[in-house]
Amino acid sequence: MITLFGERDNRILLNAILLQSSIRCKHQCQGCYTRAQEAKNPDRQSDYFILLGFIRNLVQGKGIAANQICISLDTLIDQELEQQRQFFLELLCIFKKYQRSEWLPELALTAHDLSLLGGKGPLNFPSGNHLRRYINHISLSSYQTTTDSPRAILEDLGYSATLNYNQTLGLFKAGDLQEPLGSADFVYLNLHKPPLGEEYPIITSSSRRLNVLPVNQIVSIQSQLESLKKVKSNYEDAWTEGKIIQDHCLTDSLASGCGANISKVTVWPDGAVSGCPYALEPQTGPANSADEIVENIRKSLVRNGGHYSFEDCKISETLVNLTRVKLGLES
């Protein structure tokens, strides 16, 4: 476990790296660099060889090390699915080969639903059950009602990882967490966020009256904070025990800032790097080799002159403005 972020022996030390694993992510996630760039470059493909080379360096501590690497699973068109299955087969083989490395990071996966972890997903390949043991953590975008418990399904597939559900504040009823809490290790309350740098809508009495905002099309920051308050009240024990976790972006914005470009970075499918995963533009150009990805990460870090993503984040500013609204100070 890395406890000091910085560089040692010319090696970059980070807490976490988020790896977006394909250029053709079909999910329309708001504020996503992959989505924004796909429209500009629809025929561009991920270079899995370069990404695998980067991960191979990472697990050996060659130029870079991290406590965790988190990889996003995508829903892919059929002809790309076999390529990504090959990517994950080789990825997990790397973890098996270097399982005793002192620099071996935790391996986490994020997925939109359980099907991506089974027969329809990129981890369905011969010997997959054996290799899935190297996955430490699985995060699903939302809770799904299934005949068997999600945990039992994952165990049958060969996973022994901790399980987390992401629930977006304002999009579920505060009393709807009982089943997710019963079948997962954690529930993460995700804040609905606009792309990095864009304004966070606040619904005020004047905006309602003048119909300035399409209220029926947005999740206001007010409704999200009210939802958070109700969850804390309804599930006090789970909250105290740490089974319910509020969005780190919210926690960080109420403190001194976030770890983007300091202790965590996002590596996009073309090897470009940004601090925040909600950035619409990368902070570096693409990479043509594993070493160039490492260099992109180095250039993106604040300590090396990289731009601090948190300076563009509107969450803190929005919370201040919301407080002004509550105090009757709105203009």
Image: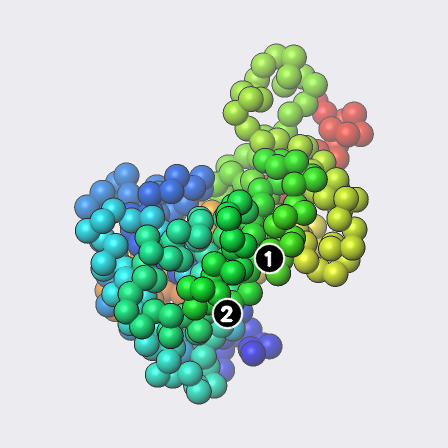
In the figure, is residue 268 to the left or right of 188? left
Residue carrying label 1: 184
* Kind of residue at badge 1: Ala
Residue carrying label 2: 160
The residue lying toward the viewer, choosing from 232 and 4, is: 232
Residue 203 in the image: state x and y as whole percent: 64, 25
In the figure, is residue 288 to the left or right of 235? left
Q: Residue at x 56, y 57 (%)?
A: 164
Residue 88 in the image: state x and y as whole percent: 32, 66
Say which element carries label 2.
loop
Quadrant occupied by the N terminus: bottom right
The residue lying toward the viewer, choosing from 2 and 292, is: 2
Residue 296 in the image: state x and y as whole percent: 36, 64
Task: Confirm whether residue 54 shows in the render.
Answer: no
Quadrant occupied by the C terminus: top right
Is 186 situated above or below 100? above
Q: Residue at x 70, y 50 (%)?
A: 254
Say which element carries label 1.
loop
